[in-house]
Structure formats: structure tokens, C-alpha cells
Image (tube, grey):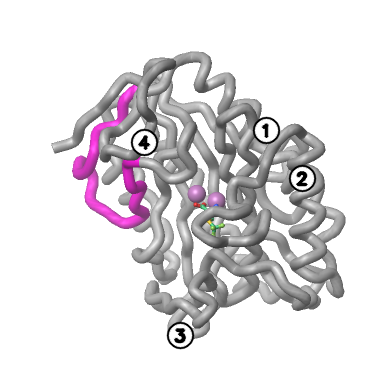
Amino acid sequence: MTEYVTVTSDMNLARNGAIKLYGRDAFEGMHRAGRLAAETLDMLVPHVVPGVTTAELDDLAREFMVAGGAAPATLGYRGYTHSSCISINHVVCHGIPSDRQLKDGDIVNIDVTPLLDGWHGDTSRMFLVGDNVPIKAKRLVDVTYECLMLGIEQAKPGNTMGDVAHAIQTHAERHRFGVVRDFCGHGVGKLFHDAPEVVHVGRPGTGPELKPGMIFTIEPMINIGKPDVKLLDDGWTAVTRDRSLSAQFEHSIGITETGCEIFTASPKGYDRPPY
Ligand code: MF3
Ligand code: CO
Ligand code: CO
């Protein structure tokens, strides 16, 4: 049984499993937070080059979010001590910024979530490092972006989460890629991670119905090989079990009366590489 609750200004926002239906003010707040998130990734574009360390990129991201009046929501989140997640090649998600240098031919996901005036703008994109990214890796990146956008196309009132998931899974598997099961999108807004779970594999017509006012992320992780992941000893870094390359894109969106709004679209049009 899916429960929905209309958000009011004085309500207790703590997780209770219900799906929140937000009003106009929330959509405006999410547009501001989402724009700052997208601008953070736009700003990073010229810095994502061979030789840069992921810690340097994390510093740039933090400084930009703070200068924009936000706090990085990941900083201190469940013991995570960085302002972004930077996931290289076979890292599926939650890569920890470090002294590791990017090298020519890498594919990299950068995921940021500024918390601005109480609203979380959560977004990630892939970046191609240097001029020698293999064709197969570029295809993975392209297909993963297409998966996200095909999912978003299904995000409208009357459809269900299963419709979103099915669109993503069908496109990925048509290309013989594996869709990660172990991580999902999520409700977002006043809370960083909220109900509902947004799965990326599923059957049409199943799962919670989408209603105007819902705010959530879609963030498919797609592997060249099998869907299986394993967690490294640091407790965060998730990698593909078969060491195949993995890609991910993420937008925060809100369901409207007729479809959805994307809060984290790039003001510069840098939504997908090449940038
Ligand atoms: N931004 C990630 C997401 O899309 C969550 C990162 S949580 C962290 O949900 F602690 F790993 F940073
Ligand atoms: Co997310
Ligand atoms: Co994210």
C-alpha cells in the first residue's frame, strides 16, 4: 500500500515511508538548488582533464557550492567526509575523492548535492577524460544518458515507477548492458534520501503511481557487463564485480499536472558529453 502525504509548512518531515506531495514553493526551491547543482558540474567541465586529482575536483565543487550559498549535503552524511562522489571507470557509484589522478581515456561520474535554503539538488553526469576514450566506453555513456531521458519521458501523472524502470531497463538491455539493482533513485526535496525508492528495472504498470507534487531522482547505473556490484573495504566505493565499465547520469525532477520538470538541467547545455 502506497501512502501519499501533502507537505505543509509545519509538518514533521522525518521519514515515515509516505510519498510527499510538494507545492509550488517547493518546486521553486528545487529549481534553485537544482540549478546550483548543475552549475557546479558545468564549472568542473574544463577541470576534468588528465592529471587532475579527484580531491582537487572535490575542493572546486565544495568551494563553488559554498560560494553559491549552499552546503554540500554529502559532507558529514552518514560519515561521508567529501563534497562529491567521483566514480572512475569500473566504479559504479560513491567513489571517494582522493589523490588519484585522472588519466586520458578514463570515464568519470561526478555526483553533487548542494543543500540550498533547505532544498537538495541532486545530480550527476559522466565526463570523458582526454581524447582517447574507447568507442565502447563512449557508447556506454551515450546509452546511459538515453536511459535517464527515456525514464524521465515516462515520469508523468498516471504512470507508475514501473513504467520509468521498464523504459530504462529495456533500452540498456537492448544494448546488452547490465542495469545495477543494488542502488536506486530516491525521493528528494527537504530530505536528501526519502521515499519512494526509484528502481531502474521493472515492469510497466507496477510500483507506486506518479502524482503531481512528487519530487525524486532518477539515476540509472549501467554496466558494460553484469549488473552485480561489490562494496570495497572503505565502506563506500561500489565497483562492478566483473570489473566492467559503469556509467551513471542523475537528474532531480518534479511531477507536474502534465509531465515533469527537470530541476538539474545544465544552464550551459552540458547535459551529456562531449562538453
Ligand atoms: N548523491 C548520491 C545520490 O545520488 C548520494 C551520495 S551519498 C554519499 O543519492 F554519502 F555517498 F555521498
Ligand atoms: Co541521488
Ligand atoms: Co547523486
Nearer the observer, 85 or 178: 85
Q: Earlier in the sequence, mark 3 or mark 1?
A: 1
Q: Is residue 28 left or right of residue 36?
A: left
Element type at mark 1: helix
x, y percentage for residue 213? 39, 22
Q: Amino acid at mark 4?
A: Ala
Picture residue at 77% right of the left edge, 34% below the top: 68
x, y percentage for residue 171? 41, 56
Residue 250 highlighted magenta (yes or no): no
Figure check: 30 above or below 147: above
Picture residue at 43% right of the left edge, 16% below the top: 9
Figure check: 169 above or below 238: above
Separation of residues labelled 2 and 3 (CA atoms): 32 Å
x, y percentage for residue 198? 36, 47
Label disc, if present, on residue 35 of the rendered structure = 1
Element type at mark 4: loop
Residue under pointer 3: 242
Residue under pointer 2: 42
Q: Earlier in the sequence, mark 2 or mark 3?
A: 2
Magenta range: 195-212
Q: Earlier in the sequence, mark 1 or mark 4?
A: 4
Q: Amino acid at mark 2?
A: Asp
Residue 198 highlighted magenta (yes or no): yes
| Pair 1/4: label in front | 4
Q: Amino acid at mark 1?
A: Arg
Residue contact between numbered discs 2 and 4, judged by CB atoms under 8 Å: no
Q: Amino acid at mark 3?
A: Asp
Separation of residues labelled 1 and 4 (CA atoms): 25 Å
Q: In terms of image quadrants, where is residue 31? A: top right
